[in-house]
Amino acid sequence: MPHKLLLAEDDRAIRHALERALTLEGYRVTAVADGVEALAHAHKSPPDVLVLDVMMPGIDGLQVCRVLRAEGDRTPILMLTALVETADRIAGLDAGADDYVVKPFDVEEVFARLRALLRRTGSGTPADVRKDVGGRTDTGGRADTGGTGTTTGTDATGTGTPAGAPQSPAPQDAAPEPSATARSLEAAGLRMDPQARRAWRGERELELTRTEFELLELLVRNAGIVLDHSTIYDRIWGYDFGPGSKNLAVYVGYLRRKLDGPGAPQLIHTVRGVGYVLRED
């Protein structure tokens, strides 16, 4: 059964072109022209994924995103934006978006990002047949942050360790643990409960979006190991967007702001030219 996709774009030409392209790609597309219609359709017939233009008259894409997230709707959201400043992208992520594409875009990139979103959010089964015990549609799902991805890097471990250097262990799969005690992860003063999707630094609970949580979980499971950009992209997004993408840097920066309170040491460190590592200095 094809995935249901809700597209909200006020530019008629872009909306019609995307609707046709996405339909040919195999999606069941509902295309609307503004945020009011988008919310109405999302409530009436929950989609598997949303594609929202940021700048729309009336209720814009960011407001649609905030409303759905406030309602507990975890449907993956891809934002379309003509705004290229980092602050604008952060605003979209803060509103609850999972990914973004900057206009003008290649439609193949939109397809790739949608595939990655559906894979990592566990939405491989269309919403029509994903039901919980109460009969409600489950539009979310826990992403598998490991196990299925193909690790790429500068050496056999995929961790970005230069040739000839001591190799670090391969990144660990983020699989659920058998008991409440075992499932708790701890590293560098952080504690995480992957099944409850909660995280703390010391006694302070962190308010994280889905992508932020999954990125932090991957880093905690591999504390002290340098993960290269390709490995992180593959494990979190299911797709390597290439060296020119700023997607990962935006998420790391935003996660750092939530982790590192006043006077607290930085936990996520940049290894220039390689990637990132979680450790206490």
Image (tube, rainbow, N blue to C red):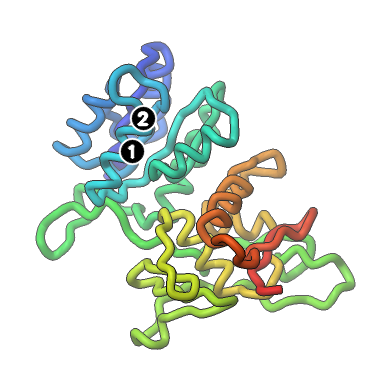
Query: Residue 256: image x %, image y %?
Result: 58, 57
* Residue closest to the far left: 134
Give the residue drawn at x 43%, y 69%. 204
Query: Residue 258: image x %, image y %?
Result: 51, 57
Give the residue drawn at x 87%, y 67%. 163
Residue, disc 2: 61
Q: Is residue 247 left or right of residue 130?
A: right
The local secondary structure at tag 2 comes to helix
Counting labels gives: 2
* Residue closest to the far top: 13
User: From the viewer's perspective, is residue 230 above or below residue 3?
Assistant: below
Q: Residues within 10 Å of mark 2 (few under 14, many from 20)?
A: many
Front residue of 104 and 93: 93
Placement of the N terminus among the 4 image quadrants = top left
Q: For marks 1 and 2, give the CA distance.
A: 6 Å
Residue, disc 1: 65
Kind of residue sitting beneath label 2? Gly
Kind of residue sitting beneath label 1? Cys
The local secondary structure at tag 1 comes to helix
Q: Is residue 40 left or right of residue 192?
A: left
Q: Mark 1 near mark 2, Cβ–Cβ under 8 Å?
A: yes
User: From the viewer's perspective, is residue 146 above or below residue 51?
Assistant: below
